[in-house]
Image: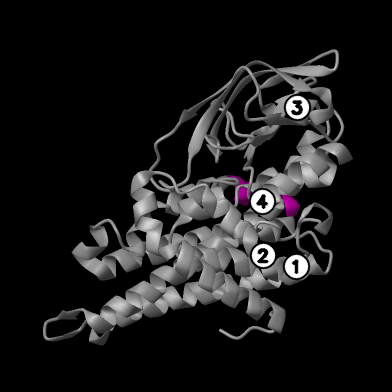
């Protein structure tokens, strides 16, 4: 669809992304999903087209990018219908911004070029076994001991948690509540760090782990920002993460729509193509309507962010809008495919399995509604 928000530069990047996905991801998506991982070499290939560096400073190998360039990246990746690949390949987009924003200059100079070149993998570790989005009450403890912090505790549901070389970890350095939370950069080979791979409903190709920190000694210079200021940095990070998820979910919904249309034109029942049955045509129109509405809301919010606004309530609602659209379209697509939609190997089936992780990750639907209502003064 035509949109006034995209320039020739965006369109050129979209074409490059589309060629990359068609060559490097789509042909292998099912194979990687079944294997439960994808080749680490994909990170370097993605870095080669500038994908990993989008939005990061050129000083560290990044590329200037506006909100719409990021939308293009998320939505072209989604065309492969492989959420697990997208999640791990782009885990640095939530793991590295706090480093770029608030780490010491020498730490930024050491870490970011390695991540943006695809040589190292970055991940964010916030969630704990005892609490999901309740960041202010996390329990992983970091005790100052001379020029080190000693870290003990656990994180879980961590995307890229198995292979990450750099972990941006939320820890408690002070008392109770948000004011006691800090961020530490913990390297993957730190003694006392162990990892347990988790099996999941979807995102099979993405490694997801529980991290165990047993008296890990972390250099004090790896503190990101000031002690006790971690909660604020985490909240800033969430806005970007939710926009990225919303862009991806809207695109996954479009993939389901496109697959359903293609199948409905080819599959014949009762002597005519599925697309000639009114009930199927109505399903497809319902899907298209929701995708168009979600895309319009997404692009308008991106424009507002470009104007310097911080529409937190609307971003929360956008994430819910996009995940609900994805859920609806995935369900309808599988229904249109019938028995074929229940078989592994098609995009709609894979996306159907990935619906819930998007509705939960980055803040559940319930939390999004609560945050939005508070922003609205309710």
- Sequence-wise, which precedes: disc 2 or disc 3? 2
Circle 3 packing at 10 Å, graded few (<14), some (14-19), many (20+), is some
Question: Marks 4/3: CA distance?
Answer: 26 Å
- Sequence-wise, which precedes: disc 3 or disc 1? 1
Q: Which residues are magenta?
A: 367-376
Residue 100: x and y in percent read: 80, 46
Q: Main secondary structure of the magenta part?
A: helix
Circle 4 packing at 10 Å, graded few (<14), some (14-19), many (20+), is many
**Residue at numbered disc 3:** 177
Point out the frontmost of discs 4 and 3.
4
Q: Is residue 342 magenta?
A: no
The answer to the question of whether label 2 and label 1 lie on touching residues, with beta carbons closer than 8 A, is yes
**Residue at numbered disc 1:** 66
Question: Marks 2/3: CA distance?
Answer: 33 Å
- Sequence-wise, which precedes: disc 4 or disc 1? 1
Disc 3 is placed on an element classified as: loop
């Amino acid at each position: 669809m035509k949109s006034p928000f995209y320039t020739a530069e965006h369109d050129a990047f979209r074409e490059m992304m589309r060629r990359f996905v068609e060559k490097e991801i789509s042909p292998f998506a099912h194979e990687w999903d079944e294997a439960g991982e994808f080749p680490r070499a994909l990170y370097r290939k993605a870095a080669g087209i500038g994908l990993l560096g989008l939005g990061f400073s050129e000083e560290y190998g990044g590329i200037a990018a506006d909100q719409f360039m990021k939308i293009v990246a998320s939505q072209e990746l989604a065309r492969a219908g492989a959420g697990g690949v997208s999640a791990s390949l782009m885990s640095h987009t939530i793991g590295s911004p706090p480093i770029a924003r608030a780490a010491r200059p020498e730490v930024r100079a050491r870490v970011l070029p390695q991540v943006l070149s695809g040589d190292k993998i970055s991940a964010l570790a916030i969630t704990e076994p005892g609490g999901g989005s309740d960041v202010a009450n996390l329990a992983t403890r970091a005790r100052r001991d001379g020029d080190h912090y000693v870290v003990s505790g656990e994180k879980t549901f961590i995307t890229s948690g198995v292979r990450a070389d750099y972990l941006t970890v939320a820890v408690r350095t002070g008392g109770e509540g948000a004011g006691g939370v800090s961020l530490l950069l913990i390297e993957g080979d730190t003694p006392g760090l162990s990892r347990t791979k988790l099996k999941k409903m979807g995102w099979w190709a993405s490694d997801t782990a529980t991290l165990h920190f047993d008296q890990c000694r972390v250099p004090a210079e790896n503190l990101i920002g000031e002690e006790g200021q971690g909660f604020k940095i985490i909240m800033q990070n969430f806005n970007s993460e939710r926009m990225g998820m919303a862009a991806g979910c809207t695109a996954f919904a479009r993939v389901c729509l496109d697959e359903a249309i293609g199948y409905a034109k080819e599959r014949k029942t009762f002597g005519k193509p599925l697309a000639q049955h009114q009930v199927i045509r109505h399903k497809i129109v319902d899907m298209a309507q929701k995708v168009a509405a979600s895309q319009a809301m997404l692009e308008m919010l991106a424009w507002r962010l470009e104007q310097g606004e911080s529409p937190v309530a609307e971003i929360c609602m956008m994430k819910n809008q996009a995940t609900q659209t994805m859920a609806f379209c995935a369900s309808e697509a599988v229904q249109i495919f019938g028995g074929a939609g229940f078989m592994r190997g098609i995009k709609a089936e894979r996306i159907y399995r990935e619906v819930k992780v998007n509705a939960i990750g980055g803040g559940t639907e319930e939390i999004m509604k609560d945050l939005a209502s508070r922003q609205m003064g309710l």
